[in-house]
């Protein structure tokens, strides 16, 4: 994770350094600045320093917990970013819970159900995989916010209950494709386990079908399901940008889009780095879960 974080700082800083545009253009507000004014702003934001020195100064500040100062808000980046990032992480956690619970449940039902039910679930998951988050957001808004008025369509709410109510539609839109993917993977993995020799052996010992499914089929199928779930939930961090914009949620994704437009480089750098770190933490947590799901993995380690 440390190596990943360090390489990410190089990629993020280098990409923004070579990207077209400059914070000076945003700060000018469309006005024509004199050479003296441009020089003063360039010196204030250290844009006249060599690239390697700017990177080194930024890296040292990061190691000291200083994310820099926002060009657009004229406030510390942590003050601007952290509250919005909390909303994004809450949204991702909510969507991730929906993906795991609903996706695994649908997959198990499809693996054991009659062909008609299996076909219906397969058709639903096919639609889910083919539906982009922004299309799901529009459909959910029309049905549950405009026509039925069950959920609000704007903002992130306050308090735990308020956030749950306001972020339900964004979380469902974000989880739409993930639920379908996990359901497909769970169905295939459980079916493969149900036809394996150790499951047939458990049945021959007189174990109930429910116990065979729970103890021998589902548990052994959780390894590929856990891997896919971790990658899918990690990918949600990037998908929040579209969903937050569609539902007017003041989160890290919408802030990142606005900061890119405003050339607010300190905010963009910090947001991208924190999202990369969150993705790395999720993948590391998945690796640790392997040992919990299957003790043989833990015993096999030297």
Image (tube, rainbow, N blue to C red):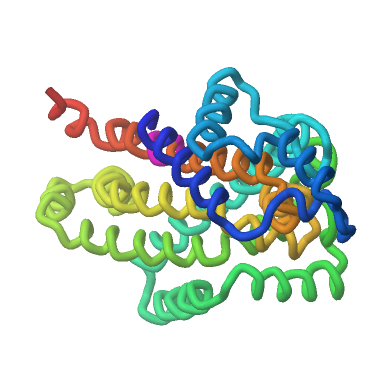
Residue at image x 76%, y 42%? 39
Along the viewing direction, whichever of 58 and 126 lies nearer the viewer: 58
In percent of width and height, residue 95 lies at: 59, 52
Residue at image x 40%, y 62%? 107
172 relative to 159 in the view: left or right: left
In percent of width and height, residue 126 lies at: 46, 77
**In what quadrant of the picture does the N terminus appear?**
top left
Along the viewing direction, whichever of 72 and 178 lies nearer the viewer: 72
Rendering quarter of residue 85: top right
227 relative to 296 in the view: left or right: right
Inspect this view and state whether residue 1 appears. Answer: yes
User: Which residue of the protein is positioned furthest toward the top in this rendering?
Assistant: 64
In percent of width and height, residue 204 lies at: 12, 51
Residue at image x 63%, y 39%? 48
Inspect this view and state whether residue 112 appears. Answer: no
293 relative to 129 in the view: left or right: left
Along the viewing direction, whichever of 133 and 21 lies nearer the viewer: 21
Q: Which residues are magenta?
A: 281-285
In percent of width and height, residue 67 lies at: 65, 30
- On screen, residue 58 above or below 251: above
Along the viewing direction, whichever of 14 and 127 lies nearer the viewer: 14
Rendering quarter of residue 267: top right
Q: Kindly report the secondary structure that dominates the magenta region of the rendered protein.
A: helix
Magenta segment: does it hold 163? no
């Amino acid at each position: 994770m440390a190596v990943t974080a360090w390489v990410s700082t190089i990629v993020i800083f280098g990409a923004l350094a070579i990207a077209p545009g400059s914070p000076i253009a945003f700060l000018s507000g469309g006005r024509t600045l004199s050479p003296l004014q441009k020089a003063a702003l360039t010196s204030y934001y250290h844009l006249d320093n060599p690239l390697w020195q700017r990177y080194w100064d930024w890296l040292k500040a990061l190691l000291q917990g200083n994310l820099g100062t926002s060009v657009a808000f004229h406030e510390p980046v942590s003050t601007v970013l952290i509250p919005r990032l909390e909303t994004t992480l809450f949204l991702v956690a909510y969507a991730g819970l929906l993906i795991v619970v609903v996706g695994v449940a649908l997959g198990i039902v499809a693996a054991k159900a009659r062909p008609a039910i299996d076909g219906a679930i397969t058709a639903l998951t096919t639609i889910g995989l083919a539906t982009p988050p922004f299309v799901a957001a529009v459909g959910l808004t029309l049905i549950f916010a405009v026509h039925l008025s069950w959920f609000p369509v704007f903002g992130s709410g306050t308090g735990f209950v308020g956030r749950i109510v306001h972020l339900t539609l964004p979380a469902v839109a974000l989880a739409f494709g993930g639920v379908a993917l996990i359901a497909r993977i769970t169905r295939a993995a459980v079916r493969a386990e149900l036809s394996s020799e150790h499951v047939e052996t458990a049945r021959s010992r007189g174990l109930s079908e429910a116990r065979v499914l729970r103890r021998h089929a589902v548990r052994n199928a959780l390894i590929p399901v856990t891997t896919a779930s971790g990658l899918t939930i990690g990918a949600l961090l990037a998908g929040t940008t579209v969903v937050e914009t569609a539902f007017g949620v003041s989160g890290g994704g919408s802030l990142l889009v606005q900061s890119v437009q405003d050339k607010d480089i300190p905010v963009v750098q910090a947001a991208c780095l924190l999202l990369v770190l969150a993705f790395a933490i999720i993948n590391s947590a998945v690796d640790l879960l392997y040992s919990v799901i299957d003790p043989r993995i833990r015993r096999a380690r030297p």
